[in-house]
Structures are given as C-alpha cells and as structure tokens.
Amino acid sequence: MIGLVMLFSAGAVRGAQDLLVKQVVWVLISLIVGGYVSFVDLDWLRNRTYIIFALCLLGLVLTLIPGIGVKVNGAQRWIGLGSLRVQPSEFAKIGLVLLLAKYFADKQREIGSFVQGFFIPSLIIGSVCLLILLQPDFGTCFLCGAVGATLLFQAGVGLRWLLPVAGLAVAAFSILVYFDPVRIRRVTSFLDVEANANDSAYQLWQGMLAFGVGGIEGVGLGMGRQQMYFLPEAHTDFIFPVIGEELGLLTTISILLTFLLLFFTVGLKLRQVSRMHEYLLAMGALLFVVLQAIINIGVVTGCLPTKGMSLPFISYGGSNLVVTFIFVGLVINVMRKKDNPSPIQAREL
C-alpha cells in the first residue's frame, strides 16, 4: 500500500495515473500468483524443478538474442511481448532457489564431497550468474551469487571450499567492474559524491538531498520536489528518497525495520523446519527479498555504489513484484506446512 501511494506521488511528472493503474494490475496479479504458491504442493513443485530451471535459463538466453531481447540504457535485460516487457533475470532467482533446494535435499549424504557437494552446485550458480552478467546486470549477478553461496553454507558445504572460491569470485567480479567504464565510474563517483554531484553522481546526490530536506517528519505527502525533474528514476530505483522527503525519517526507519522484522521472524521460525528442501526454499526466498531491499536502501543512502535495483514491494515494476510475492508465497507455504504437518500413515504389518 505504501508502494502504491508513493508511486502516485513519485510519478507526478511521468503520468502518475497511468503508472498507478498498471501497478495496481501487477499487484492483483502478484496477489493471485503469490496466493497460489502459498498453497501449492511443495512435493509437486519439487518434481518439476528441472523444467522450471530450464525455462529460466531459456529466458536468460533469449534475452541476449537480438530482436527478442530489448535493450534499455545499454542493458539488454528484457524480453518484449508486444507492449509488455518481462525481465527473465528476476524469474531466474526462483529457478536458482528451487534447484539448489532440490539438489541438496537429494544429495544430503554427498554434501561433504567436493564434486557432489560443492562443484556441481557451484556450476548451477555460475551458469545463472554468467548469463545475467552478459546482459550486463552486475547487481543481480552479485545478488544471485551471494544468495547461492549462503545456501551452500546453510546446506552444510565446508568453508574450506567456500572461502577460497568466494574470494576468487569477488576478485574476478572486481576486475570486471574495473575494466567496465560505466561501472568503475559509478564506484569512483560513490567514493566522492559531492565532487561528482553534477555528473555521474547526480542522481545519488539528489537522493541524499531528498533525505535531508525531509528531516524527521517529512514535508508532507505529495509536497516533495525532488521527483519533479530532479530524480530521473524516482518511481523505480530511487523511490525510497521520495519517501524520505515526503514522509520523513520515521517512515523510512519503519520500512527498514519491517524488512528486518521479516528476516528475523522467518529466520527464527525456520529453525523448526526439519526437511532440508523446505528449509532451503524458504531461506533462499527470504534472502532474495531482504538482501535486495538492503542493497537498494544502501545505494540510495550513499552506503553502496549506485546500482539499478528496485526496492521490493514498493518500486514500480511488474516482474520484480510478481517474483517477490512468489517468494513470500513460498515462505508462507513452508511455514503453513510446518505448523500443520501431514499425518504419518501407519504401515500395516
């Protein structure tokens, strides 16, 4: 609800009514899909994991094909279906979580081995990250890699393999950023925002000004000025500064605390889940939602280098909203099954 209200305000100069109508439609679709996922049979879903993952990889490949993939601002991350644009990298997150959960649930006895426990799941993560990196989408690639590595650790993979490979992955990622003119400029601008306020750090500087103007209580709903031609992506990646300007520090802190409450509440409840498959499903879903929120908030507050990543539940966009509700549906499904376990049928002698 906060997202819809703030979208109407942030999109004032971009056709707020049109944006709001589209987002309301996406919210309704997301509620239906998320509600369905919260009641779907997890064993049925588990048996179709390979099909879902294959479709996710196919979507990532199609994105890279000229004529099918749609390029916006130098990045080819969307597939055009008439007037509708779908972002396959968002749905690839679902495929990654489903496959890792199924794989480790099936290979619990081999988790301690290098090939079965580490190498093969690393290839799964690497295939998704590589295809996303080719778009290029460094932020989503980093997010998928971080969540994948965390699931490996949660499944019981030893740190003697995780730490060296994670270090090499971070080093390789840093080298790619260094030799990419756009990304390295974002990093240098992040290190000195004020010096680049009229150039590469313009949007970040305007976002920080919005937080400063809003103060503790904000200037009032609909009274903000930064989204009026100052913040180019006010309705998507930088909607959080608009909230800070209009509703103030109290509201932005409340949103942050809500994400943290979601993380700790679900995290504590997951300690009672006995099945590996269900535990990793819910943990992966939770990490994708919360880590994305932390990255977005870190970027718009100047704590992390600028990266185009939406704020879950709040930013404008259909693909991310649907995927976020699917993840919430998975969490609810696992919690519901934990609280209402299926009765065990006695075996006849």
Image (spheres, rainbow, N blue to C red):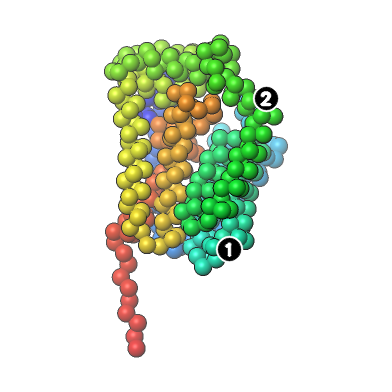
Residue 322 vs residue 60: left or right? left
User: Residue 152: x and y, percent?
Assistant: 51, 53
Q: Marks 1 and 2: which is nearer the front?
A: 1
On screen, residue 67 above or below 302? below
Residue 178 vs residue 315: left or right? right
User: Residue 324: x and y, percent?
Assistant: 43, 42
Q: Secondary structure at mark 2?
A: helix
Q: Which amino acid, mark 1?
A: Ser
Q: Secondary structure at mark 1?
A: loop
Q: Which mark is residue 130?
A: none
In the rendered picture of this protein, how many numbered marks are placed on residues?
2
| Residue found at x 44% / y 63% | 43
| Residue found at x 44% / y 34% | 294
User: Residue 269: x and y, percent?
Assistant: 32, 52
Q: Which mark is residue 113?
A: 1
On screen, residue 240 above or below 340? above
Mark 1 Cα within 10 Å, few/some/many (few <14, many 20+)? few
Residue picked out by circle 2: 181
Judge by depth and name the residue closer to the eye, 311 or 163.
163
Residue 210 vs residue 169: left or right? left
Q: Is the N terminus in the top left, top right, bottom left or bottom right quadrant?
A: top left
